[in-house]
Amino acid sequence: MEDVLTQSILLVDDRPENLLVLENILEMPGLNLIKANSGEEALRLLLKNDVALVLLDVQMPGMDGFETAEIMRSAPGTRHIPIIFVTAISKEQKHIFRGYEAGAVDYMFKPVDPDILKSKVKVFLELDRRKKVVEQKNLELEEAKKNTDKILKNVRNGLFLLDREFRLKPQYSAVLEKILMRKNLANMSFIEFLENKIEDKIVKSCKDYLNLLYRESVHEGTLDKLNPLNDIKMIFKSDKSESGIIKILNFSFRRVYDNQNKIDEIIATVADNTEKITLAKKLEESEDHYKKQMELAFNILHVDPPLLIEFMDSVQTELNTIKKLLKNSEKTEQYSDTLDKVFRSIHLVKGNASLLDLKFFVNQTHEFEENIIKIQEKGKIEGSDFLPLVLRLEGIQKTISEINSLFERIKNIHDHFRPKREYENQLFVKSLENLAKNTAKDLNKQVKFDYKEFDLGNIPYNNRLLVKEVLIQLIRNSIFHGIEKSEERKKLKKSTTGVIALSSFNQDKQFGFTLKDDGKGIQLERLQEQAKSLKKWKDKDKSKWTSEDIIDLICLQGVSTSDKANHVAGRGVGMASVREKVEKIGGKIEVNYKENMFSEFTVTIPKSDVRN
Amino acid sequence: MSDKIKIMVVDDSNMIIKMIQGFLQSYQIEIVGVANDGQTAVELFKKTDPDIVTLDITMPKMDGLTVLQEMLKIKDTTKVIIISALTDNATALKALQIGAKDFIPKPFKEDSFKEVLNRILSEN
């Protein structure tokens, strides 16, 4: 509602007839005319009334107009009330108007020109009206400030004001103390506060920046770009400890102008962005993680889905076995045994992974193996040695669940492209061929994998994973222990490229396969030597060794014709584990060989529990 | 003021000079000088007496801050717009402290250049 403002004018003259004249001229609606016969009365009335303008006669008995004005100027309540002096003295004497520069002062000469008086009064009334509006605004502002004070207590951002010396004014938001980790901030030097928390160079920049902010000639927008305290990393050190709390604070500064359009103070806000930025970093990390997942995805996209599912199942089985082993090994005497078993399981997983060309998995499991070897080499095994293994296991488990979830997501794609039956055979042998190639490459050997005589159809579906596991082991053993390097083969008048041939059979009651390589055959001396040195083999004449004996030897823990354990084979661990599995379903592994000519492994599995 | 406003462009990169020249085409501003290094800039400044200077803060022979000081010593009403890499805010702040009028961080686009220039022109 726009209320009509009633304004009052105080008319001061010792002569009633003069007052009457003024009254007549100035009578208008919304204007209240108050009359006084003397300076004293005028001052008294001024205390009681809100007056917009005083028309003051200069020559009065007692207190004259100038004296009255002087007193008005000295009192806060009347200091700003404008005065029009009304005087009969000649224009030549106007110099006696002692410079009343402060405030609004005018003068008029008697006889008063009604029109001029009216227009002058109107100007002053208008000024008064504006002043009243401003006052109203100020009241509102005052109210607003009170409200802001309330808000200041609740806002999450720190809010404070900086004076020209960059000291904090007493009003600041409650949270500021928390953000700046200091109490009683009133009057604190902001620059001193910054010292030792950020680089000296930046403190200096900050001083420059705040100085410029107080310099009106510099555009505020220009300075915005130069704020040195934008997401600044601050170290809050306590007196005692060397390390401190690190926060990332974002300060921003704005000018506050007074009503004369001069920069009065700087209002600053500060937000604690530590969490936000940490979150952003986390996001980045998760993006990295996402990239890794993409790699994983590409990796597993190459793998035939049924194979992958089998692989995943087998890994999970092995992981569970390992977990159980680790959980149940409480006695120190068991440690060594547990370690062996864990190694066997992991080795199997590695073999499967390298078959499917899942490099990340091969690396992960290889590191795991290395870890076990280190513990074994140490001699005395302690319970705490298992801790890194548990951690690594978690890593592998994580990879598994990632592949699982990735696989779920891409399964639909695969379902559409599910390989046809004849293609499955291709996939199966191709993956083995891959393994052979990669293994040979790692060992600097040349190998050809011949699978013409192999038909996956001979192998019942539910035995394929097992067959594959056995084949992985055998192929690796062949390349590692059987096939010689090209130069060596040349000397033996063999073709420089070794051949590994795979064939399959399916008879009435059994099925199986044979893997034959044209390498150096089984090196009995070496096997025996190692077995002896490990005291794990009874002294037995090697000429009487049966195929079973040899398989036993190969499978013995720690026995390997290769001295140095590496990624590819060694330690016969894989063999022992696949043999266990084959025997579990009533199958057997046989070996046939001729030194420097060939070695041949045949796996036969009874069909009893076979359903195709 | 009947005379055209005179501007001088100082930058060690001719590409940036060309770019600024392009930006200035739509203005009634006369480019009275172009310099690639600080020393030449100061000499040219004395000769051409420009109203506005755009000044690259990192330059060969004489660094931007010195050039700025020299120019303001000759005529302190010169409106100098500092152009500098955003990574060098401390120098930009120093330049403003010395008396540069405004600051444009590199790399800049036509909009941000014109925004600053318009601001400076409107102050007349």
Image (cartoon, coloured by chain):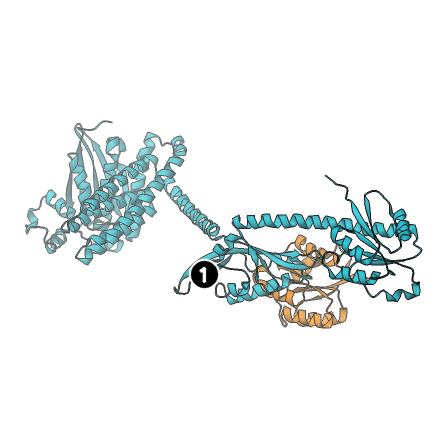
Can residue A203 be seen at all in this image of the molecule? yes
Q: Position of residue A182 (x, y in %)?
A: 48, 59
Residue drawn 63% across and 59% down? A265
The one of A192 and B89 positioned closer to us in this rendering? A192
Left or right, residue A273 beside residue A48: left
* Residue A1 placement, left or right of A512: right
Which residue occupies the foreground of this view, A432 or B94? B94
Indicate the secondary structure of the residue bearing disc 1: strand
Identify which amino acid the numbered label 1 is placed on.
Phe
Tell me the quarter of the image containing the C terminus of chain B: bottom right
Residue positioned 91% across, 66% down in the render:
A93
Eyeballing the image, is A565 above or below A241? above
Query: Quadrant location of the N terminus of chain B?
Result: bottom right
Name the chain letter of the residue that bears numbered label 1: A
Q: Position of residue A420 (x, y in %)?
A: 35, 30
Q: On the image, which quarter does residue A91 sit in?
A: bottom right
**The color chain A is rendered in:** cyan
Of all chains in the rendering, the one displayed in orange is: B
Residue bearing the label numbered 1: A236
Residue placed at 66% from the left, 70% from the top?
B67
Q: Position of residue A23 (x, y in %)?
A: 88, 48
- Asked whether A11 or A227 is in front, the reply is A11
Is residue B98 found left or right of A555 in the rendered image?
right
